[in-house]
Image: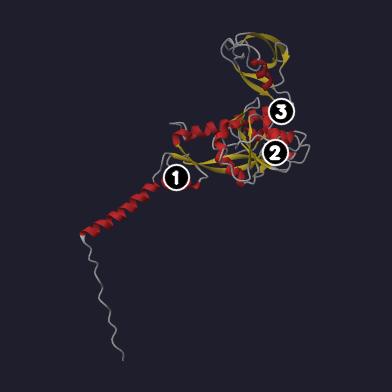
Amino acid sequence: MGAPITTPPRRRLNLTPRTITMLVSAVATVGLGAAMFALPVPYVLETPGPTLDTLGEQDGVVLVQVPEEPSHPLTGQLLLTTVGAIGSEPGSLNLLRLVRGYLSGDEALLPYDVVYAPGQTTEEREEQSAQQMSSSQYTAEVAALEELGYTVTPVVEGIPEGHVLQLGDKLLAVNGVPITGYGQLIDLMDSLEGGSTVTVQVERDGQTADVEVVTQGGEGEPARLGVAVGFDTPVEVTYGIENIGGPSAGTMFALAIIDKLGDEDLAAGNIVAGTGTMDADGSVGAIGGIRQKMIGADEAGATLFLAPKANCDEVQGHVPDGLQVVAIETLDDAVAALEAMRDGVAGTLPSCDVK
């Protein structure tokens, strides 16, 4: 028989009061640190959002629908770009996620009150965003149709009390000059001086009439009719966009309409992304989150990105490798950029990344 197996006696931890205090403090510190990183912070983290091809479909729904089939095959893609927002709901962004986003380099950290109006409810914000999207679609339609040569008739949609023009008046001419579109109306009024009297020919209740209007604006300022103007368009465009708000897709909507209704294939097999508000006169305006939109465009395979010239200072030094960013101020500029890429001379376009 072998020797008996003996078990050594257990050692007791001889914890001094000081050691116990240190252990309790360490556990408490870890717990407090974890709790701190889980606490909500008053910031919004902007992230690259998804892209959508305005020439295509989403879940079987055509994103930009025109009433007639295109005269040419639609090749390539015209991508609208978006920005995601973590923290759009108060308390939904914690410190740990904030730190991760800040260190990633692909996300932007902004104070909550800079992104959203103080005191604005989630419902109010969503309603405002939806209205901005609807307005951008409307003005994109007007600008695109005028770019294509359609006549878009301005219509009076709002008047102050006592104005000589009436709701529903179609504006046909000013001082004998026929009105062919909103942009042309603005150019014409810009050539006149505020306070002058103009003769406006209108269509009212099926009849034409001449109305004398004393314009608004001071001496040396451009004349304005002092009414809110809508549009009577000859072509109806509908949209299948859901769960996206804001005004920044206007430029890409307008380009999709032009590609679908025009005689030429603008995208021409290329993947082009972009952003920018679109006014009815074809002016392209600044937007937010352009760095994140460029990242999203690059990830979607775009090689050309159309950026509002007003955003170029944010673009410089942040362009993903292989993505050409072109500065645009008008819808004409955007169309010219697509034509240049189609014709293989995109290198001549004005860069938004000149340092």
Count residues near mark 2 (Cα–Cα under 10 Å), then give few for <14, some for 14-19, many for 20+. some
User: Which-is-in-front pick, marks 3 and 2?
Assistant: 2
Image position of 48 with respect to 136: above or below:
below
The image quarter containing residue 267 is top right
Contact flag, marks 1 and 2 (Cβ < 8 Å): no
Looking at the image, residue 72 sits to the left or right of residue 160; the answer is: right
Instruction: Work out whether mark 3 precedes mark 2 in sequence or the reverse, and give the earlier one.
Output: 3
Seen from the viewer's position, the closer of residues 127 and 87 is 87
**The N terminus appears in which quarter of the rendering?**
bottom left
User: Residue 313: in sight, yes or no?
Assistant: yes
Query: Which sits in the foreground, 204 or 245?
Result: 245
Residue 329 versus residue 85 in the image, above or below: above
Amino acid found under the numbered disc labelled 2: Ala
Q: Give x and y (percent) for residue 187.
A: 67, 18
> Farthest residue in the front direction?
355
Q: Position of residue 245 (x, y in %)?
A: 56, 35
**At label 3, which amino acid type do we have?**
Glu
Tag 3 residue? 147
- Split into 4 quadrants, where in the image is the C terminus? top right
Where disc 3 sits, the SS reads helix
| Mark 3 neighbour class, 10 Å CA radius: few under 14, some 14 to 19, many 20 or more | many
Give the alpha-carbon distance from disc 1 to disc 2, as whole Å: 38 Å
Q: Could one spot residue 257 in this view of the protein?
A: no
Residue at mark 2? 346
Q: Where is 209 relative to 345, above or below?
A: above
Disc 3/disc 2 C-alpha distance (Å): 21 Å
